[in-house]
Each structure stands twice: as C-alpha cells, then as structure tokens.
Amino acid sequence: MMRRTLHIALTLLLILSAGSLSAQRRLTADNDHHKNSVGHSSRAFTTRDTQAATDRKGLRQSLYVGDHHSFGLALTGAYSTFLSSSSGVSSRPGGYAMGFDLLYEYQHQYLLFQVGLGVAWQDVRLNVDNLRFTNTDRVRDWGASWATIVDSWGTPLKSLNYSFTRRSERLRNGYVHIPLLVGGTYAGFYGLAGAKLNIAFIGSSKVKATCTTTGTYDRYIGTGNNNEWEEMDNHGYRKNVDLAQSGSRVPFKMDIMLSAEVGYEWVMKETWRLRLAAYADYGLVNINPKGNDYAAFVPAATKFDFATYQLHPSFGSRETSSAGVHNLFVGLKFTILYTLYQPDKCILCSHTRRSKHWH
C-alpha cells in the first residue's frame, strides 16, 4: 500500500513539472518574438530610453519616432534695437518688439523643418550726438536771403548759428516676415536655425531735441564768446527751446535676418506640444534707406521761428547715408503645436492607439 501511494505521488509530480516547463518555454518564445518585433519596427521603441516612464497601461511613453506634420502658433517678446556704423547714433537705450507667427512644421525622425508667416511690431528709442551748423552750410534754400538781418549801418551779420542738443529719436515699425528654419529635437530639447525675410510696411517716427540760436557779429568790439550774441529774444536768439516733431516711418529696405532659437517642449494630451525658447534675429542686410534731407534744417523764410524747424530721423538722412543699419531682436518665444497622426497598431495590446514619438 505504501509503495502504491509513493508511485502515484511521483507520477503527479512528473506531470506538474512537465506543464511548468512547457509554460516557461512558451513565455520565453513570446518574449523573444516581442524583442524581435520591437527591434525592427520603424515606429517602435528605441533602445536609448529603456528607463522611460510608463503610462497607466504599462506602456513606455515618448519612444515612438516617425514622420509627422504639425501646425501651430508662436508668440514672441524681445528686446530690440538698431545697430549702426554711424558714430553719431547710439543703439541705446533700444526698445521692445512683439509678434506672432503661424507655423507649419514637418518632423522626420529627429529632424525638424519649419516655415511660417508672421508679423511683428517694434518700438525703439535712439540717442543722437549734438548737432551744430550755421546758415552758410545747412539752411535749406537760404541763398542770399540771410542778408535781411543787418546792423544799423546796413551791414549783414556774419552768420547765424544753430545748435541741437539732447536729441532722441523714437522709431516704430511694423514688419511682416517669412521664416524658413531647420533643426532637430531630442529628449525634449530642440533647436532651430535659418533665415527670415523681413519687410517693413507701416510705422511712424518722432524726433526730440533742444535748440539754441545765436548770432556772430564780427564788427562788435569786445571780449565776448567769439563775438557770439545769445539770449536776445528781440533778435530771435533763444536758448534751450525744446522741439518735438512726429512724422512718417523710416522707409527701411527689405531685410534678410539670421534667426536661431533653442528651447524645451512639453507633450500635452499626445497631440499637443508646448515650447518655450530663447531666440535671436540679426539683420544681415544694410536696411538704411537713401535720403536727401538733413537730420535737422531750417527753412529760409522762418529762420527764427522754432516751430517750423525741421527734424528728420537720422536713418535715411544725409548725415548717415553711408552708414550701415542692422536690425536686432533678442527675446523669448512661446509656441503651441498641434500634430496630425496616423493610427498605429499597438504591439503590446489588441486595440489601436495613436503613436507617441517625442524624445
């Protein structure tokens, strides 16, 4: 009886062992098949992110790669100014710019290609060196009419002097631009670089200065300031008169800017991405327009009427006609993208899901 019981027990143990071995072999085969599938799928898991987080179904996220198309909107805010080779115009204090772009982006694996259409508004302040001239070298259409200022013997004054100090300029410009950028993305970080076609189409200008007028009379016998008469209102000689004139925009030339941005992106609900980046745009083209007007001049008929003195923005004037002028923007860029997908078969489950591909 004892022997029979032992025989039955050994038989049951052998059957259970065989079943366990068979199940283990099937599990090993399934795992090998899964590894082969993962390693050869163009939209499968990468081998670089083995420690990636899993979603609630236990599937690793941010591991799909492939081609896709995205559409989005970008908002920008930046410090902006003009860099000029003119020694008389300072790029400080500068100003600000803001804008938005409509974007299309194509991603091929880790590579990015982006094109768009956008607008930007720029508000920049510049400081300009003091300016001094006389009626003989700067007054427009003066000719011989300056001789109407004479002494009691009928002898004309030698010269009338004009001094413009504490001059500042405010330039406002609206641009339309077309960016064409290429770059790449990995592990959430991305970078883009390329060119932007930038065209100014609206704007305005405002010039402020403090003006002083004096007269030089070489027949006066004395030890004054080189015989320069000043602060004589009855003769039109006034000191420190504040002037301000507003005008149309400076007609800047079409620009091609070098553009670059570097930032980080977050995946939101699989089809949406948010990006925050630092960016910079620098104008490669000299946009300074040619002009015939002086930065300041006095109409002949109103040489003592301060309200008629003409102030012109430095860029586009005769004084800076040979100087180079280049745009500069440095700031932050916020982008939101919506991505179109093709449904992919999940390799770990029976249902169809959208593929996730960000790195």
Image (spheres, helix red, strand yellow):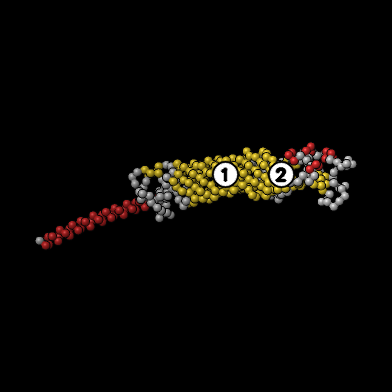
Q: Is residue 322 visible?
A: no
Give the amino acid at mark 1.
Met
Marked residue nearer the N-terminal end (1 or 2)? 1
Residue pointed to by mark 2: 242
Q: Residue at x 31, y 54 (%)?
A: 28
Query: In terms of secondary structure, where does tag 2 sit?
Result: strand
Give the amino acid at mark 2.
Asp
Q: Quadrant of residue 309?
A: top right
Q: Residue at x 75, y 41 (%)?
A: 306
Q: Residues within 10 Å of mark 1 (few under 14, many from 20)?
A: many
Front position in the image: 95 or 257: 95
Residue 136: x %, y % from top left = 81, 43
In the rendered view, would you say 54 is above or below 247? Answer: below
Residue 214: x %, y % from top left = 79, 46
Q: Residues within 10 Å of mark 2 (few under 14, many from 20)?
A: some
Residue pointed to by mark 1: 98
In the image, 111: left or right of 230? Answer: left
